[in-house]
Image (cartoon, rainbow, N blue to C red):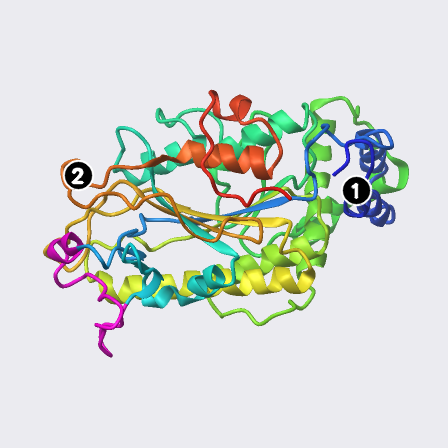
Amino acid sequence: MDDQTYTRRIFLQRGMSFASLAATAPLFIQRSALGMMPPAGLSSQPGVPEDRVLVVVQLGGGNDGLNTVVPYGNDAYYKARPDLAVPAPGRGTARRPAALQVDGANGIGLHPSFSGFKELIDEGAACVVQGVGYPNPNRSHFTSMDIWHTADTSATGYGWLGRYVDCTCKGTPEPEQTIAVGRTAPLALQGALQKPVTFETPELFRWMGEDLHPALDEPYRQINRTGRLDGVDPDSQMGFLMRTALDAQVSSDRIRAAVARRPLVQYPRTALAGQLRTVASMIRADMSTRVYYVSFGGFDTHAGQAGRHSNLLRQTGDALNAFYRDLKAQGANERVLTMVFSEFGRRVGANASGGTDHGTAAPMYFVGDMVKPGLLGRHPSLTNLDDGDLIFNVDFRSVYAAVLEDWMGTPSKPVLGRAYRKAVIFKPRA
């Protein structure tokens, strides 16, 4: 986006959304909204491509990267997992289907149930970044997930995406700048200034004043009529709390209106697909949200992994495929990047329970027309191990740096705390 002009989308996101609130939003919100609008011809921060969106998909539990991105050309893989390894192409059976070939020269493919994602790779709209991790890896679900969320191996501080919004909004984060669909607000979206909008289902994300007691809705109605509440100083703590609550009502109304529209494609009837369908509806409504976050768990496959993992990968691949089809039908496929990660991979060797235990390095997955398609980077060695675990090739913060700088258009050092060499993920700019 040119630094001196508004795009049509920015005008729709800001000008039209504020206009649409005029009949329902309290006067102080309307006035605040007008005050937050940058001067004509200026974006909130020069050079930031405000029409670009990042969607983060978290696979909770530690997805088994070796059985997702399958090194079928490596004998060490089959020696480590004689009963759990995915057969090489041409060697599968009805009970154990073969891997889907991606890189025949290096003997690497995808789990057969991940066909929805493989289809996107074949179309040039998806990629895998191999061997992603960090030094001195932690095998605790909670600590490792916090490390990924904070981009800090001490697992402390605010979330990396929360810091991103703090840095780009110059102290005035907008409502709905980040949205998480799920039960809890992820640490990744928590900033010093930025706090995400979070809801599990759009039906539950609604103003409850009238439902609890009709009298509770009167303050809102009074402020909407007069711009103030009798006996309450707008600059007081009570005034702040009221503004916060009413901002939530406005967000609720806007989000529920967005997701009420029928999607442009058919989605699978699964939890992850439902979350991505909700996100696609909000993107279609031209909301000003820069980052969406969804989560899908169940990947802690210590026992009986084969069938369970197959089902999880099928749901993940099919959901990502439907989401991309929806974005393409909207004409948004070139402005939405989807990033998929898990807190760690699994150990190279299978355990005695037909599963795998907590490991270290694992692949990351990206979907969007802007990514370099296929397999990126080198697959980790299966013989040069760290106490039975893979040694990472790519620091995950190098991936974050690429997303921040090459996609979100913002310097990564203020967000990540130091400079990282960017991973190569995106196609060269024309």
- Identity, as a three-letter code, of the amino acid under mark 1: Arg
Q: Which residue is mark 1?
A: 14
- Circles 1 and 2, Cβ within 8 Å, touching? The answer is no
- Taking the spot 68% from the left edge, 61% from the top edge, the residue there is 330
Q: Describe the element under mark 2 as helix, strand or loop.
A: loop
Q: Position of residue 370 (x, y in %)?
A: 57, 49
- Tell how many labels: 2
Magenta stretch, residue numbers: 75-98
Is residue 256 at least partly visible in the picture? no
Q: Describe the element under mark 1 as helix, strand or loop.
A: helix
Within-10-Å neighbours for mark 2: few <14, some 14–19, many 20+: some
**Is 329 drawn above or below residue 41 in the view shown?**
below
Assess whether residue 82 is covered by the magenta stretch: yes
1 or 2: mark nearer the eye: 2
**Is 64 drawn above or below residue 122 in the view shown?**
above
Q: Give me the C-alpha separation between circle 1 and circle 2.
A: 52 Å
Which badge, 1 or 2, is on the more N-terminal residue?
A: 1
Q: Is residue 170 left or right of residue 196?
A: right
